[in-house]
Image (spheres, grey):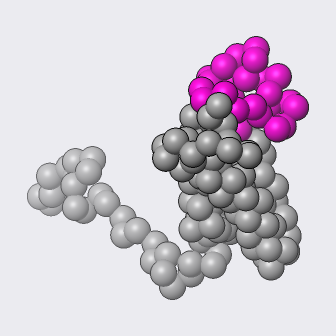
């Protein structure tokens, strides 16, 4: 009987397989395993998070929520409800972008750009209100009486 080599242990260098080269096939890898638009998604989530934060600051200084459904959720469930609602919408938009993007890559990219633009709009308005609050500005459109 020939001498056999010692058994290979799990996790040893001999049992580990080389990871696939995703850089060589990045397009096919992303379609199978990753998201299509990771950088734009980061901006979308960032602006959506800022929207929640600015909304909460503005509400605590006497402002009101313009979105009737969001206002009802805030009245019923406060900040946790607002966060669940907002990030539920974010998840829905990301799923739609992925589905559209897998069928038509350019359309998905355009959709996520629109999502970013639309989520940035209330952030800009909110930032103006928060700045006015911080500076103590009074007058038309001011939340401070």
> Would you place residue 26 above or below residue 70 in this image?
below
Q: Nearer the viewer, residue 101 or 121?
A: 121
**Residue 61, image quadrant:** top right
Quadrant location of the N terminus in the rendered image: bottom left
Q: Residue at x 57, y 45 (%)?
A: 137
Q: Residue at x 62, y 53 (%)?
A: 128
> Would you place residue 37 above or below residue 49 in this image?
below
- 132 relative position to 20: left or right: right
Numbered label tally = 0
**Residue 21, image quadrant:** bottom left
Q: Is residue 95 visible?
A: no
Q: Residue at x 36, y 69 (%)?
A: 18
Q: Nearer the viewer, residue 1 or 8?
A: 8
**Residue 89, image quadrant:** top right
Quadrant location of the C terminus in the rendered image: top right
Q: Nearer the viewer, residue 17 or 36?
A: 36
- 36 relative position to 24: left or right: right
Residue that sits furthest to the top in the current view: 76
Residue 63 rendering spot, x and y as whole percentages: 70, 32
> Would you place residue 50 above or below residue 31 in this image?
above
Residue that sits furthest to the left in the current view: 3
Residue that sits furthest to the bottom in the current view: 24
Residue 83 colored in magenta in the image: yes
Residue 32 colored in magenta in the image: no
| Residues drawn in magenta | 60-86
Q: Nearer the viewer, residue 138 or 126?
A: 138
Main secondary structure type of the part rendered in magenta: helix
Q: Residue at x 59, y 52 (%)?
A: 127
Q: Is residue 114 visible?
A: yes
Residue 76 rendering spot, x and y as whole percentages: 76, 14
Residue 99 rendering spot, x and y as whole percentages: 81, 60
- 90 relative position to 18: left or right: right
């Amino acid at each position: 009987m020939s001498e056999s080599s010692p058994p290979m242990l799990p996790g040893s260098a001999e049992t580990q397989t080389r990871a696939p080269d995703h850089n060589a096939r990045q397009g096919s890898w992303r379609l199978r395993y990753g998201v299509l638009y990771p950088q734009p998604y980061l901006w979308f989530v960032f602006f959506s998070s800022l929207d929640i934060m600015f909304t909460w600051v503005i509400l605590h200084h006497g402002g009101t929520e313009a979105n009737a459904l969001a206002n009802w959720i805030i009245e019923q469930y406060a900040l946790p409800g607002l966060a669940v609602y907002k990030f539920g919408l974010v998840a829905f938009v990301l799923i739609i972008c992925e589905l559209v993007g897998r069928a038509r890559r350019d359309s998905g990219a355009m959709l996520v750009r629109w999502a970013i633009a639309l989520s940035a709009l209330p952030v800009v308005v909110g930032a103006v209100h928060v700045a006015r609050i911080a500076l103590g500005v009074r007058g038309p459109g001011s939340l401070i009486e």
